[in-house]
Image (cartoon, rainbow, N blue to C red):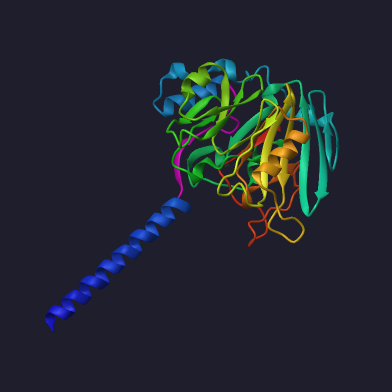
Amino acid sequence: MQGWIKRHIWTIGTTVILIISSTFVLLDTFVLEHAVVKLDSGTKIASDVQQVVDTTESDPSSSNESNVSNSSEALSYTEAVSSAVVDSSSYQDEHLSVEITTHDENGVVYYVADIKTDTPELLRTALANDTYGKNVTATTSSIASAHDAILAINGDYYGFRDSGYVVRNGVLLRSSVLSSTTEDLIIDKDGNLSIAYEGSYDPQEAIDNGAVDILSFGPALVIDGEAVDRVTQNGEKNNPRTAIGQIEEGHYVFVVVDGRTSQSTGVTLDALAQICLNLGCKTAYNLDGGGSSTLYFNGVVINNPTDGRNNGERKVSDIVYFGY
């Protein structure tokens, strides 16, 4: 009898430990915030980058002052927007123009932001709460608002993964390789987009050679003006999608596709690539999608974000945006 009781106590104890352990793993993965580096709001100038590099105990010489705009040369947000011509779907100032169009084709609703600028520094990235770390999240619109973004989309949601290169504003925040087949998006100091396989290059060397931001979601959609034909586990399914593309120097598109609703099914990666190709993109890249897919313009969320169960923005780790 005592042996039976001991066995049951042991079974119950083991079960409780497993439940607690599993609960902690789930909380640690999806809920508990782990801030690693706190970036000053608007880390865009060399002195800010130096401060961040020092706090991460990296080599101070690794900061790339040529990759970020100098505060004395930075354009004034207030001055720019005060002279801008703005309506619900367009923005025009001396250095930046944005035109947003809505498309409803074959049961798919998607939005295209056509962007032109003569100032590559206006293409920026930002982190939730200006903090790099695990489960540090905020909605695209709140991050955009905090950074005076004129136009923004969700980024690569780096915090959902433990590996994959993360470079923001010329600072190397994570250098672990996700996969040798992962295609990264590199944004350089001239605002040009390029694609590289992770592990085939050193991210710090890329920074030294002019990289300002590296995102590692993917995959690539268009390379050298050719759509990348691929079939992946999730890529062949219709889903909400977000993409960034470059048509030529200073000319970009943001594409956001609604999905998982009766109004819009979403698209496959191949279909998203074709949209970008039809827009004239020479380079295009897939960012985080699903419930994360969000297009923000001038204080308003333009699309209809949903994960298929809950309507509204999903909190994310980061954004890509245009702003001063």
Q: In which quarter of the image is residue 4?
A: bottom left
Q: In which quarter of the image is residue 119?
A: top right
Q: Toward the viewer: 294 or 217? A: 217
Q: Toward the viewer: 19 or 171? A: 19
- Point out the residue furthest to the bottom here: 1
Residue drawn at x 75%, y 44% is 299
Give the quadrant of the N terminus.
bottom left
Q: In which quarter of the image is residue 71?
A: top right
Q: Where is residue 23 in the image (x, y as percent from the top left)?
A: 39, 60
Label total for image: 0
Q: Indicate whether 290 appears above or below 46.
A: below
Residue drawn at x 44%, y 42% is 162
Residue 44: say if magenta: yes
Q: Which segment did they paint magenta?
A: 33-45
Residue 274: say if magenta: no
Q: Indicate whether 268 appears above or below 56.
A: below
Q: Indicate whether 23 appears above or below 142.
A: below
Q: Where is residue 109 in the image (x, y as percent from the top left)?
A: 77, 50
Can you see residue 154? yes
Residue drawn at x 70%, y 32% is 245
Magenta span main SS: loop
Can you see residue 31? no
